[in-house]
Amino acid sequence: MRRDRAIPPDYDTADAPRRLGTLQDVAEELGATPNQVVLARMMQGDPPIVPVLGVSTVDQLDEGLRSVDVELTPEHQRRLDT
């Protein structure tokens, strides 16, 4: 999630602000970044998905790698999915 870029039109739906707000709330609760929460959700899903990171900086790589330490509760997963 990059605040310096607009949401692509295909993803800028009526419920996008609510969904992004939930993502931000969960990230704050977990002390993680929104990107880490998205990656954690992918890896903790059923079936689990192993994301391929595309990064431009070492900081972005570090952020992505730390997503393996983000533990989503069933309640977090439910909120992210709805």
Image (cartoon, rainbow, N blue to C red):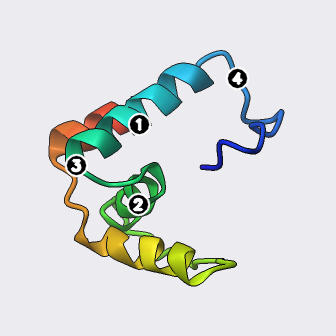
Q: Which residue shows up at 52% across the image and 76% down it?
A: 59
| Image position, residue 69 (x, y; %) | 24, 71
Label at residue 36? 2
Q: Which residue is mark 4?
A: 13
| Image position, residue 18 (x, y; %) | 50, 20
> Residue most toward the top?
14
Real-space CA distance between mark 3 and mark 4, rounded to the nearest whole angstrom: 26 Å
- Check whether the beta carbons of the residues at disc 2 and disc 4 lie within 8 A of each other: no
Q: Which residue shows up at 48% across the image and 56% down it?
A: 35
Element marked by disc 4: loop
Mark 1 / mark 4, whichever is N-terminal:
4
Task: Check disc 2 and give the amino acid type.
Answer: Gln
Label at residue 30? 3
| Image position, residue 64 (x, y; %) | 46, 72
Taking the image as shown, residue 12 lies to the left or right of residue 24, namely right
Real-space CA distance between mark 2 and mark 3, rounded to the nearest whole angstrom: 10 Å
Q: Which residue shows up at 18% across the image and 37% down it?
A: 75
Mark 2 / mark 4, whichever is N-terminal:
4
Real-space CA distance between mark 3 and mark 1, rounded to the nearest whole angstrom: 10 Å
Crowding at dot 1, Cα within 10 Å, few <14 / some 14-19 / many 20+, comes out as: some
Real-space CA distance between mark 2 and mark 4, rounded to the nearest whole angstrom: 22 Å
- Residue 27 appears in the figure: yes
Mark 3 / mark 1, whichever is N-terminal:
1
Mark 2 / mark 3, whichever is N-terminal:
3
Relative height, residue 25 to residue 58 (above, below): above
Q: Which residue is mark 1?
A: 24
Relative height, residue 12 to residue 60 (above, below): above
Q: In the rendered view of the protein, which quadrant contains the C terminus? A: top left
Please tell me which residue lies in front, 31 or 44: 31
Label at residue 46? none
